[in-house]
Amino acid sequence: MPNEKTAWEILRQKVLRSSQVRLVDRIAMERFHMHSLVLMEHAALGCAHWIRDRFSQPRRCVILCGRGNNGGDGLVVARHLRTFGWSCRTVVHGPLEALRADALANARILIEDAGDDVRFEETASQETRSVLQDAELIIDAMLGTGATGTPRPPYDAWILWANDSEAMRIAIDLPTGVDADSGESFDPSFRADATLTFVAMKPAMVDPSCQRVFGEVAVLPIGLPQRLMELLSTTAPESILDSPRTAER
């Protein structure tokens, strides 16, 4: 029927806990044989397209990246925004060797592409404070759904400086310092004008009292196979993982 919703349209309107979305990643990798780098590439490319479409022309952008998968997303976003003509400065919680596997792989790609526009620091520097003050857009790719509690250095200083900037602020997946399930905000937490989350809404994102925490929320795809999205549109991730014949009709 012409008005029938697609599996993706149904999925993006669902609400999944952070642990369930991580389980979706696991199902995609274990049952559908997708590589985590492929998922990261799709997620970040969607973010880059959303950002490009939001602005009428390229802007001066600073991307703050952690050591894990959220940081990896940010590194890929930086690479794609550069191809769109954006000026991107990327600050990463270093050293390079401390990054997790997928983030490390994408950091090496970006270093070859962007050179000195990629910086690694273990403690928050005045240089980072300066570039944040000059930015027109700040992207939070510091900590993902696996992080809990008050952000530690250097993230705490980065967040305070970003919040003090007049730039637009966009969070990837969720704002650092915010619990996506409960909506609890720790001190400090990234004040997002928009949040680009993946796969489905998280519980706090549909709570009206938390709207100021996330800003505008957009749910973006990560390149999941059609069959998996069909299953997720009607079935909880836990049930899919327990099913012995997930990938077969």
Image: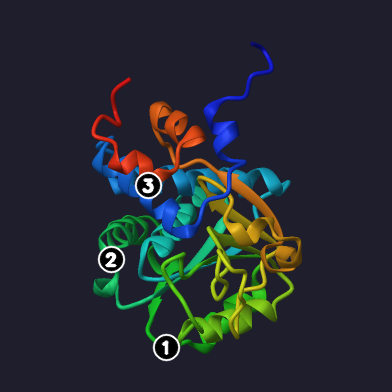
203 sits left or right of 38 in the view: right
Residue identifier under label 2 = 100
- Nearest to the eye among marks 3 and 1: give it: 3
Q: Is residue 122 above or below residue 45?
A: below
Q: Dividing the image into 4 quarters, which one contains the N terminus?
A: top right
Please identify the quadrant where the C terminus is shown: top left
Mark 2 or mark 3, which has the lower sequence index?
2
Say which amino acid is labelled 1: Thr
Identify which residue is drawn at 32% across, 55% down: 109
In this rendering, the answer to whether 14 lies above or below 178 is above
Return the mark for residue 185: none
> How busy is the neighbourhood of tag 1: few (under 14 within 10 Å), some, or many (20 plus)?
few
Against 87, is 165 above or below? Answer: below
Residue 12, position as x, y percentages in the image = 58, 40
Residue 111: x and y, percent?
Answer: 34, 62
* Contact flag, marks 2 and 3 (Cβ < 8 Å): no
| Position of residue 171 measured from the top left corner of the image (x, y, whole percent) | 58, 62
Residue underneath mark 1: 123
User: SS of the residue at dot 2?
Assistant: loop
60 left or right, relative to 81: right
The Cα–Cα distance between marks 3 and 1, rounded to whole angstroms, is 39 Å
The residue that label 3 is drawn on is 238
Q: Amino acid at mark 3?
A: Glu
Q: Secondary structure at mark 1?
A: loop
